[in-house]
Amino acid sequence: AQRVTQPEKLLSVFKGAPVELKCNYSYSGSPELFWYVQYSRQRLQLLLRHISRESIKGFTADLNKGETSFHLKKPFAQEEDSAMYYCALSGSARQLTFGSGTQLTVLP
Amino acid sequence: DAGITQSPRYKITETGRQVTLMCHQTWSHSYMFWYRQDLGHGLRLIYYSAAADITDKGEVPDGYVVSRSKTENFPLTLESATRSQTSVYFCASSHYTGTQNTEAFFGQGTRLTVV
């Protein structure tokens, strides 16, 4: 079975402050991990994936297999980062499982 | 138009009625997924499909039926709608390259209310 846990339902930070959205997973094999974002009134869209090791919109995420975590980080939050963020896992069965999401609010 | 589209966007139905939500994608992606989005639960997988005529249950399949006779379509049917199935439903598609899945592309969602 595969499971994704996002412990924070709501997270508020001030503009310019660092932000970290936590994601832990449970999977016995080698998973693919993703972060998806849903801005207000927009479709859910991919933010980044661990395979590509990219920085998108200033966000990064590192897969830590020892801690089974894939936390999303940004050093300086912007108001336009306010959105719902979902961590997701794809295992060998290609089933794409999402966490419960974290609503990020960046305050001015 | 290229992409993934869901219909209808909004639906109100009565308890006990059958309702079908449609999903169509134009990329010939192999994988398609149905999720429901509820406050506090995030996105929960209902069913997914790896190819035409291949479907598998997700986390919350009870009360739902899917079919995939064609690669591009993946309809979701609520055989006898219940109030607990009031939710926003999202369809998604992705392609499996043989070693990994491409990103999943999502439809705009269907807001279903069961009264």
Image (cartoon, coloured by chain):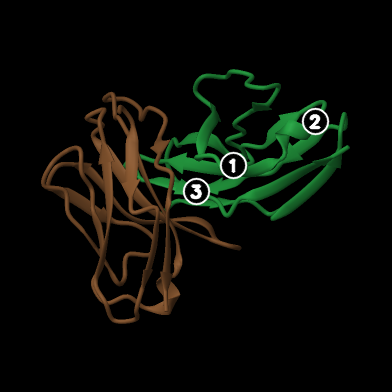
Q: Colour of chain A?
A: green
Residue depicted at 82% across the width and 26% down the height: A76
Residue depicted at 57% across the width and 55% down the height: A100
Q: Is mark 3 on a helix, strand or loop?
A: strand
Residue with the mark numbered 3: A98
* Picture coordinates of residue A67, whole percent (x, y): 64, 41
Residue depicted at 23% across the width and 34% down the height: B30
Say few, some or many: other residues with alpha carbon within 10 Å of mark 2 (under 14 / 14 to 19 / 20 or more): many
Residue with the mark numbered 2: A77
Q: Colour of chain B?
A: brown
* Picture coordinates of residue B79, whole percent (x, y): 23, 72
To the question of a shared chain for discs 3 and 1, the answer is yes
Residue with the mark numbered 1: A68
**Left or right of residue A76: residue A39:** left
Closest to the camera, between mark 1 and mark 2, is 2
Closest to the camera, between mark 3 and mark 2, is 2
Q: In which quarter of the image is the C terminus of chain A?
A: top right
Q: What element carries label 1?
A: loop
State which chain disc 3 sits on: A
